[in-house]
Amino acid sequence: MRRALSPVPIAIVCVLLALMALLAYGLAQNEPDRGVDEALARGERSPAAALELPKLGGGGNVALADYRGQVVVLNFWASWCKPCKDESPLLERWHRRMKGRGGMVLGVAMYDVTGRAQDFIDEYGLTYPMLKDDEDEGLEKFGVAQLPETFVIDRRGRIAAVARGPVDDAFMRSNVVPLLEPS
Amino acid sequence: MRHAALALAALAFALVPASTALAQDCPRTTLGDIEDEVMCPVCGTPLGLASESPQAQDERAYIQDLVDRCKTKDEVKQALVAEYGENVLALPGDQGDDDFGDVLVYVIPALGIVLAAAGIAFAVVRWRRPERQPRALAGTEGARLDDDMERYDL
């Protein structure tokens, strides 16, 4: 008859496996949420997460829901991010273009120092509203893991398109213009 | 005139130690002292390990600016929290919002090390222990077993 294994090594192996599972869980928790991208790949528009952030430089909070009924181009950026510098003039141009047609750009400075973000806004003459994300809301609610990232939100508050990287005119034309048309 | 000059000299003499003390107190901390205790939020690593990231470089410049303005380590950390949120603090216990999690951060690695050491020790002891010889069978039992083995031609 085979001798039964001692409970001591079994217990040690079990606890080590539990620790490894805990480590794997911790790593999985840090993975950005890609639910929005998956929904778009299926041809679905998922509702944008509730986002409420302070205005950059103070002056109270602003919620994404405050802009319901408008097409919102939600852009996450930082002053140290090179592609953000490249796309900012384009976003400003599109903000002015959309303003009278029920659309707007909403900027969210992430991982940034307020003074430097303000300098960036002044340098590029950005006039669209700016918020400050200092609690990783972009990461947790929109899966923002690299800057810049842009979400196009339709008039019903659903995400219609995502750019995980800088946007260009072609992206804006194909994803924003159709939403501005009166339905 | 002479009295005024003397008063001025006395005032200057009184101010020299104060300004020297102020100069000695500043800077109150260093970038190197702080960057191991805060995170580079974009890299997900302590700032001290994040060398090339633009965000890390920007954060370092911000810290250095605060250090140059004579801020203490705690004041620098508070300023970083105001800009980047509590997740910028790397040390368990600094964030102050999850005491149980802070304890686990220290307990789990220690537990892992203790258990791994126990497992290795157990394996070494078993490996070094001599194999126990099978007990010889008593006379009649042994003879009967030999007969059986021969009968089955094994």
Image (cartoon, rainbow, N blue to C red):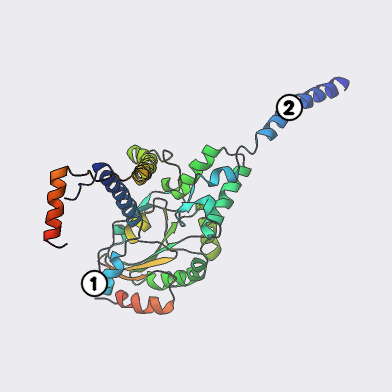
The answer to whether residue B109 is visible is no
Residue B71 picture location, percent across and down? 58, 39
Q: Residue furthest right?
A: B2
Answer with left or right where residue B144 lies relative to residue B78: left
Indicate whether B45 appears above or below A7: below
Please report, as a chain letter, where disc 1 is located: A
The residue drawn where x is 55% and y is 43% is B34
Where residue A37 sits, quadrant-wise, is bottom left
The residue drawn where x is 75% and y is 28% is B16
Residue A111 picture location, percent across and down? 46, 55
Task: Check disc 1 and give the amino acid type.
Answer: Glu
Location of the C terminus of chain A by quadrant is bottom left
Answer with left or right where residue A52 lies relative to residue A93: left
Label 2 sits on residue? B17
For label 2, the crowd category at 10 Å Cα-Cα, with few meaning under 14, some 14 to 19 and many 20 or more, is: few
Q: Nearer the viewer, residue A174 or B23?
A: B23
Where residue B94 sits, quadrant-wise, is top left
Q: Nearer the viewer, residue B112 or B143?
A: B143
Indicate whether A164 appears above or below B121: below
